[in-house]
Image (cartoon, rainbow, N blue to C red):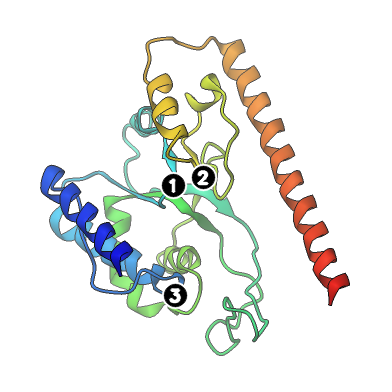
Amino acid sequence: MPILVTTQQEIDKESHKNNDIIEGIFLDSAENQTLKIIAMTQWAVTFCPNALFILKVDEEMFVNLPSLVDYLLTLKEHLEDIYAGRVIHQEMPNRDPNSQEFVPLSEYPEKYYPDYCSGEAFIMSQDVARMMYVVFKEAPIIVPADVFVGICAKSIGLIPIHSSRFSGKRHIRYNRCCYKFIFTSSETTDAEMPLVWKEINDRKECTLFETYSGLISCKLLTYLDSFERFHFGTIKNNAMYFGD
């Protein structure tokens, strides 16, 4: 209980200071992430009708707002029908009844989910948010939240726009010139965030070569991190199996 009280106090303090928090009346659980997206979209289309874009971001995500805004400004006349992020292609529903992510055939009978943007961070134009909100009630809530958005996008004839500058679930290993280019990085710690934000907002521009080499460095180190986590997880699972 003290932890919950402290968290609520911090939320109240932030809200009083910046007036930038909307608090929903449902349990913030994995099962209710879809309700969070519905509430977010409802609020945006109701109270922020002049906002051209709506950005959905998970906690512990670094977002390079200057880079993302520059990208959106290049769209110029094409400011509608935008549903962009790191697109997941041909993912299969979880049919294991023992899994928390189990999706029965009765709820979603298709072999594959439609293409959708990974839920860690994606962006919608205002017109898309309005259309999405209309069709939200027609999609099965039992599917993962980001898949839910993808199903709604398909129902209105929208094709998600892929950009590898969105990290999805991956934490991108830090490199100044790489971070000046990408849009997001997952699992950014409280210690990393101030340093990263300070450096990407400095006035030191990266040359084309520095940007290119930084992106290569980020990609290689990120893949190495992913491999190490996979290798460690395999060893741990095998050890548990042997112990049983």
**Secondary structure beneath disc 1?**
loop
Q: Please give left or right for residue 182 compared with residue 210 in the image.
A: left
Looking at this view, is 89 or 226 the one in front?
226
Percent coordinates x, y for residue 190 in the rendering = 42, 39
Q: Quadrant of residue 135?
A: bottom left
Query: Mark 3 highlights which residue?
Result: 31
The reply to whether discs 2 and 3 touch (Cβ–Cβ < 8 Å) is no
Instruction: Identify residue type, mark 3.
Output: Glu
Q: Is residue 195 above or below residue 50?
A: above
Percent coordinates x, y for residue 24 in the rendering = 24, 67
Query: Mark 1 highlights which residue?
Result: 60
Query: Mark 2 highlights which residue?
Result: 186
Q: Using the image, tell me which numbered label, if any, was put on residue 205.
A: none
Residue 45 shows up from this direction = yes
Q: Earlier in the sequence, mark 2 or mark 3?
A: 3
Percent coordinates x, y for residue 51 in the rendering = 21, 45
Q: Is residue 183 above or below residue 181?
A: below
Foreground disc of the pair 3, 1:
1
Instruction: Identify residue type, mark 1.
Output: Glu
Q: Earlier in the sequence, mark 2 or mark 1?
A: 1
The reply to whether discs 2 and 1 touch (Cβ–Cβ < 8 Å) is yes
The Cα–Cα distance between marks 2 and 3, rounded to whole angstroms, is 21 Å
Instruction: Identify residue type, mark 2.
Output: Ser
Q: Quadrant of the C terminus?
A: bottom right
**Secondary structure beneath disc 2?**
loop
Q: Please give left or right for residue 180 compared with residue 169 in the image.
A: left
